[in-house]
Amino acid sequence: MKLSTRITSITGGGSDGWDVFYRARRMIADGIPVTELTIGEHDIRTHPDILGAMQASARGGHTGYATVPGTTALRSAIAHRIAARTGVPTAPANILVTPGGQAGLFAAHMAVCNQDDPALFIDPYYVTYPGTIRAVGAVPRAIVTSPETAFQPTASAIAAAARGAVSLLVNTPNNPTGAVYSPQTLNDIARVCQDHDLWLISDEVYDTQVWDGTHISPRALPGMADRTLVVGSMSKSHAMTGSRIGWVCAPEHVIAHLLNLATHTTYGVAGFIQDAATYALHQGADLENTVAAPFRRRRALTLQALAGQNIVRALPIEGAMYAMLDIRATGLSSADFANALLDAEKIAVMPGESFGNAAAGHIRVAMTIDDDRYVAALHRLVGFADRCKPKH
Ligand code: PMP
């Protein structure tokens, strides 16, 4: 029996640079101690008070079907947070609660792409982007950025790709590059979207992790609120990755249709998870800053650990929980470097190619282990890179 092309073509096939990751997992399963700097997951767990709210809600009976677009309390809390952070008037009717940001990315593309429509995204990219676009039947079209412009997309590159496209997906603060898009970049993005009549899908799941510059939501730029779908999540901001809770913020008529999609796919999000999320959002920025603090600290430790040498160079780490390191001076491809580093030092990092061709020659290091082990791993990584360097 034949499966649908849509399901079999979600992933491009091949290892996509993920073999280092799977090899590290196998080594760990075999009892080999590996320093894991691959995946973007906090080394803290969800705050006990959030779990308390979750338990109280479940015990209080919120275990039945919850209303599909999301509870009024959570949609209001999300709308309030967005309005407060961006200044754009936002109502509960602009919000669909989703089981995580990933479901939001899928829903957003479902809302704006027809079969075979070209949908734009920026390379390097978060791993699921092309697959998400293919999953809705659209055709992913990459806009390549370069380390020389700190992986910020340029207006000319976006405009050159825009012909025939229906949407543009951007992500700031960015995974994997750590870039926070500048006001200039965001204005360029807004202008190209208006000139080419593109929907903008803005993935802002790292909006609380900004170390340099400020997070600007492109929805807040002139003329953009009517053509922007913002994807948000509690995964990174509140260390709630496993709770699967996020949202899409969009014009009311878009949400009205997304409600139908949710009804026919997820049928909503568990009520006790929504209540826990509502509780968490009511704690305001204090809790968000506590969750972000280790990454802010480790970002500074990264810059210290890499100072005084130039074999491994950090790109500006402006936001998110990753350091993108340029290892081109070693003369190795990033996959060869990452594989050799795993063998020699038992340190697992992601080769840049896992996130697209634009990140070749780079590795992504997740700042997700305790400070002492993290700094020690960076020193070993630099020592290893130095030994790889071509001898003249
Ligand atoms: N967007 C980006 C850029 C991410 O890095 C992630 C998770 N790593 C997601 C979306 C999805 O996050 P979640 O589904 O956990 O909200």
Image (cartoon, rainbow, N blue to C red):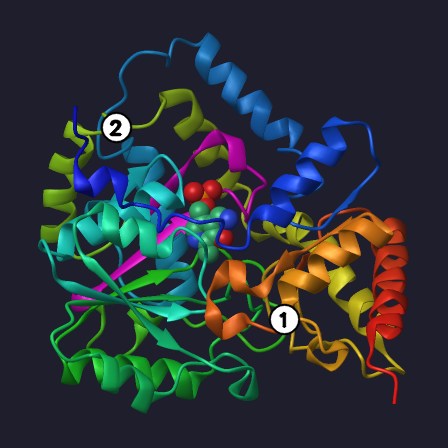
Residue 11 spot, x, y in % from top left: 35, 47
Residue 4 spot, x, y in % from top left: 16, 36
Residue 264 spot, x, y in % from top left: 15, 28
Residues rendered magenta in the picture = 226-247
Looking at the rendered structure, which numbered label has been put on residue 266? Answer: 2
Which quarter of the figure is the N terminus placed in? Answer: top left
Residue at x-position 86% and y-position 52%: 345
Residue 222 is at least partly visible in this image: no
Looking at the rendered structure, which numbered label has been put on residue 362? Answer: 1
- Towards the viewer: 353 or 113: 353
Residue at x-position 29% and y-position 45%: 10
Within 10 Å of disc 1 (Cα), the crowding (few <14, some 14-19, many 20+) is many
Position of residue 187 in the picture relative to residue 371 (left or right):
left
Residue at x-position 54% and y-position 73%: 179
Does the stretch in magenta take in 362? no
Position of residue 299 in the picture relative to residue 271 (left or right):
right
Q: What kind of residue is marked 1?
A: His
Which quarter of the figure is the C terminus placed in? Answer: bottom right
Residue 223 is at least partly visible in this image: yes
Up-down relation of residue 374 to residue 85 (above or below): above
Q: How many marks?
A: 2
Query: Cβ of disc 2 within 8 Å of ligand 1?
Result: no
- Towards the viewer: 55 or 340: 340
Spatial CA distance of label 2 from label 1 is 37 Å
**Residue 117 picture quarter:** bottom left
Looking at the rendered structure, which numbered label has been put on residue 139? Answer: none
Q: Upstream in the sequence, badge 2 or badge 1?
A: 2
Numbered disc in front, either 2 or 1: 1
Query: Cβ of disc 1 within 8 Å of ligand 1?
Result: no
Q: What kind of residue is marked 2?
A: Thr
- Towards the viewer: 221 or 145: 145
